[in-house]
Image: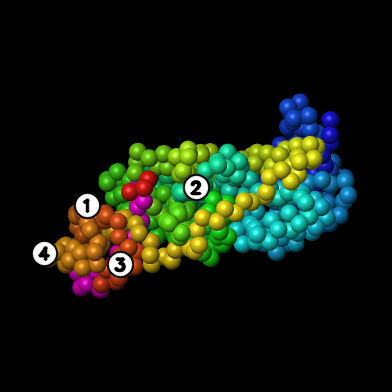
Amino acid sequence: MRKVNVGLIGFGTVGSGVAEALKAKRGYIKSRYNLDINLIKICDKDIISKRKVKVDSSLLTKNAYDIIDNPAVDIVIELIGGIEKAKEFILAALKKKKHVVTANKALLSIAKDELFQVAEKNGVQLHFEASVCSGIPIIKALREGLAANRIQSIYGIVNGTCNYILSEMDEKAIDFATALKQAQEKGYAESDPSLDIKGHDSAHKLAILASLCFGIDVKPKDIYTEGITDISSADIKYASGFGYAVKLLAIAKKMERELEVRVHPTLVPRNYPLASVSSNFNGVLIESDIVGETFFYGQGSGAKPTASAVISDIIDISNDIVNKKLEKFPIIVYDKQVDKIKPKKDFYCSYYIRFSAIDKPGVLASISKILADHSISIASVSQKVRSKQKVVPIIMLTHKAKELSVAEALEKIDALDAIRRKSVVIRSERSRI
């Protein structure tokens, strides 16, 4: 039986979860894979606070280079998050011929090419299953399970915090602030949740998935990103009346030689699998040319799901170490299927639009005319009961229209004397999903 030594950098909630799982599953991994995964060093800036898992104090260090420079360490696990220090440690480990496992989606989203090139130059592996959807093996599915397929589109609920908030708003008819507070109380949202609720976490993950699928180095700055902070319980209720749920989707789809990449709240038909992904769960739908649609569902965050993904990568690398097959499969395969990222103005979607108008004759006709002048066709319209301020919500669903045309039309509509508040727009992918 071959022993493979690993060092862990980062001993917070996720890191201690990985250490606990490695300890608990060591015997199981031995019996199933004939591998002895041995955790020999743990680094963290805080080595005093108690963790759920008990480890010998001799394993603990505050210096990451006690792991990186240790010739006995075969695999370095990076779980500190952030950019600068994590990048420094990963690059140093790769250059020391150490294999690396990371869950760092923020770093990978902006520096994946550089990291992969250094890994390949030094003949070592860099695995990152836990960086997207944690417990769902989506990276392995794309790299291996769907290796013969050309991916056509990705639709993903990849942030559990946002999905929990939107699910609670939908199921309990509560407002955003109340749902966010509940998410924080349950540990699903950070004290500063901005990275999640503004859509940036989803954009980091989409940058990784889109790069894997479409052969172009997608970075977060390339992705149109819109969070859920402006979604109201009223809009969720109105959308439900039309048969839709509202979800924060990470979307990437190939349109000939262009790639659309965007993160935003999206109307999803109630009878579609993504609509059933509730609470803090994740779901990813992949459309490809051979197999068609495949749907991946499960826990996308937390210590245990992340530990599951990290240990999967450790076992994968360990098997290759033992069998001396470290160059059997490229870290990332760039099959360039697109030439450029499509700009936002050229997106082509269906739309949910809520106008806030004074209840008087001719308003609906004025709105409809401006939409028609911009080649926007109305699929459905509903006028709600007016408020005490005599403002009437007018809800419209449109057929597919160009983003620029919708923006120009709404600018004119919102300037009408009868319109009292800025119109609310939520995109719909109902013609595709």
Task: Please tell me in which quadrant of the rendered image residue 345 appears.
Answer: bottom left
Separation of marks 4 and 2 at Cα, in angstroms: 50 Å
Q: Does 45 sit left or right of 243 as displayed?
A: right
Q: Which residues are magenta?
A: 413-430
Q: How far across and how far down the image is residue 91, in percent?
A: 75, 59
Q: Earlier in the sequence, mark 1 or mark 2?
A: 2
Do the numbered discs 4 and 2 sit on residues whose CB atoms are within 8 Å?
A: no
The residue carrying mark 2 is: 151
**Are circles 1 and 4 on residues that touch, CB within 8 Å?**
no
**Residue count near mark 3 (Cα–Cα under 10 Å), binned few <14, some 14–19, many ≥20:** some
Q: Earlier in the sequence, mark 3 or mark 2?
A: 2
Label of residue 405 in the image: 3
167 vs 226: above or below = above
Between tags 4 and 3, which lies in front?
A: 3
* Inter-mark Cα distance, 4 to 3: 26 Å
The x, y position of residue 432, in whole percent, is: 36, 48
Q: Nearer the viewer, mark 1 or mark 4?
A: 1
Label disc, if present, on residue 380 of the rendered structure: 1
- What amino acid does circle 2 point to? Ile
- Up-down: is 387 above or below 76? below
User: Which amino acid, by three-letter code, is at mark 1?
Assistant: Ser
Picture quarter with the C terminus: top left
Out of 180 and 126, give the one closest to the viewer.
Answer: 126
The alpha-carbon separation of the residues under discs 1 and 4 comes to 19 Å
N-terminal of the two: label 3 or label 1? 1
What is the spatial separation of the Cα atoms under label 3 and label 2, in whole angstroms? 29 Å
For mark 1, give the secondary structure.
strand
CA separation in Å, label 1 and label 2: 32 Å
Q: Which mark is residue 361?
A: 4
Residue 144 on the magenta span:
no
Q: Nearer the viewer, mark 3 or mark 1?
A: 3
Q: Tag 2, which secondary structure? A: strand
